[in-house]
Amino acid sequence: MSVLEQIKEEVIAGNAKNVKEYVNTAVSQGIDVSMILNDGLIAGMNVIGPLFKNNQVYIPEVLMAARAMHAGLAVIKPLIAKAGLKEKGLVAIGTVKGDLHDIGKNLVIMMLEGAGYKVLDLGIDVPTEKFVQVVEEESPQVVGLSALLTTTMPQMRETVKELKKYGARIKIIVGGAPITAKFAKDIGADGFAEDAASAVGVVTDLLA
Amino acid sequence: MERFHGRKEIAPAELLPEEFLADYDRLVASWNGMEDDIIRAVAPLPPFPWLEAILGAAVQVGEEAIWTTEGGFEYADIGSLDLSKGNSWRGKYLEFVATLKNHYQDRCPVGQPILRGVSDMIAALRGASQMVLDMYDNPGQFQRLAKLCSDLLIELIEEQQEITGPFAGGYEVEQLSLWAPDRIIRLQEDASVFFSPTLYVQYLRGENERQASSFPYSVIHLHSSSLFLLDKILDIASLKCIQINKDVGGADIQNMLPFLKMVQNRGKRLIIRGKLDHDDISLMRRDLMPEGLYLQIVVEEQAETAGFREFFQPWQ
């Protein structure tokens, strides 16, 4: 098994210590950093995502895999900058105002980072003004809104309405337990992610 | 609770049970026009995160919800947790129980409100993601904290029931308007959605078993998002009843049916609660046994109940 395959397998197994070791080995062997990233770390998360979507693994396995991927990412981060590699895109994501739930949002962040996107985590209970401020200051290509409570769905509508003023400059995706494709369409969102694993595909399609 | 809006933390001394009695009276008066056989209960501020507060989490009050600040608890502090009867939030909970009992006497029972489960308490203390990682990184500490949380829940319900005594010979779960002919405990593990079946068995099921077996009657509250754990939960022999929510945005009845049947086939009582429509009820009439089944149909307006009467015929 090549060192890249070992990195991938250890990410899938959620073994952060081994991932770090194998990434160090790969770096010392002079393997291109983009290969370590894409064929090792991201490749591992690309296996976990569909397994999670199909209920073959559960949230703990995803969390462990994401942590393992981050352990490897930390090793090559300086090399990524030096090599001039760019992230696939910038996504800003937060749970809308009045909603304090973060696990769904966090899972989406892990999946997006695992797929090579840079993600700005705006946290929970995020007011519309904060989303607008981030669009102005950070220029993300995609803004993600999460909600778990039916009572905060009107707030999601309100925030999307404000963000639509930026037109084609940003794409808006929404998700969360009570959110449906119909609701997403009704409020004018560009994309709807049924679950955390689907979010990567939705973002990729929107940026294609 | 409006006066607490926007505050970062409230103290037990600021909550006076007597100040809420007028609200409770309005609630109890509203039950008068209902033509049903349900025994409804009052309970200490049902949406209040009592257990998290007792564990030391800061309570905040918003316009729509009352919550505790998540995370921040360190295992090094387990030893200094004071969960004794001298804990001021524990005392405040029981003060509410005693005040309500004294006020309502035999007019209505004082039941168990929504008290969170072990996973919910630990998620509140550690944060949901960190809670999961703890099971891999600090399994011994996690188990120690889980036991403390479980003991707290059991003891609090026991103390409440000592204060109230029986109502019509039994005890009540307020959230479900569920009366049992002896002492009953309501369990929940909403944060078990972050577990895998393996981790549930390893870290939670033993606590749920201990809680259920501490009382003659027990019911566990589940959302459809946790049904992947149902098979493991049903292994708890002492657990008498399973209550499953049909949630907005959650699984529909068609997809829940295999799980609902599993509950009945394993010999447990089943309560289904949510906005059930006529199609849902037809499906359940076709596939479920009426014995031990309790449908709690949630409606927006009382007038909607008339439309359900045709379904309330004896099932074949």
Image (cartoon, coloured by chain):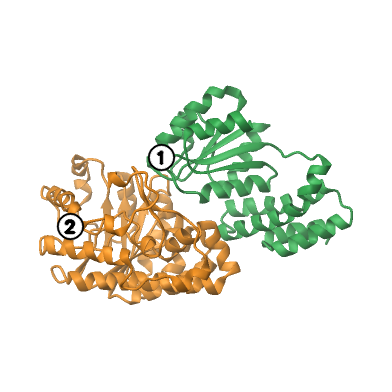
Chain colours: A green, B orange
Q: Is residue B235 visible?
A: no
- Dot 1 corresponds to which residue? A152
Above or below residue A78? Residue A60 is below
Q: In the image shown, does A10 or B291 lie closer to the viewer?
A: A10
- Position of A151 with respect to B311 (left or right) is right
Q: Amino acid at mark 2?
A: Ile
Please give the chain letter of the residue carrying mark 1.
Answer: A
Q: CA distance from mark 2 to mark 1?
A: 31 Å
Quadrant of the snapshot with the N terminus of chain A: bottom right
Q: Amino acid at mark 1?
A: Thr
Q: Position of residue A126 (x, y in %)?
A: 48, 39
Please give the chain letter of the residue carrying mark 2.
Answer: B
Above or below residue B126? Residue B240 is below
Secondary structure found at label 1 = helix
Secondary structure found at label 2 = loop
- Residue at the image point whose x is 52% and y is 31% from the top: A189
- Residue at the image point whose x is 66% and y is 46% from the top: A113
Quarter where residue B155 is shown: bottom left
Q: Is residue B310 visible?
A: yes
- Residue at the image point whose x is 46% and y is 40% from the top: A179
Depth check, mark 2 against mark 1: the one in front is 1
Q: Position of residue B252 (x, y in %)?
A: 40, 48
Q: Position of residue A62 (x, y in %)?
A: 61, 56
- Dot 2 corresponds to which residue? B38
Q: Residues within 10 Å of mark 2 (few under 14, many from 20)?
A: few
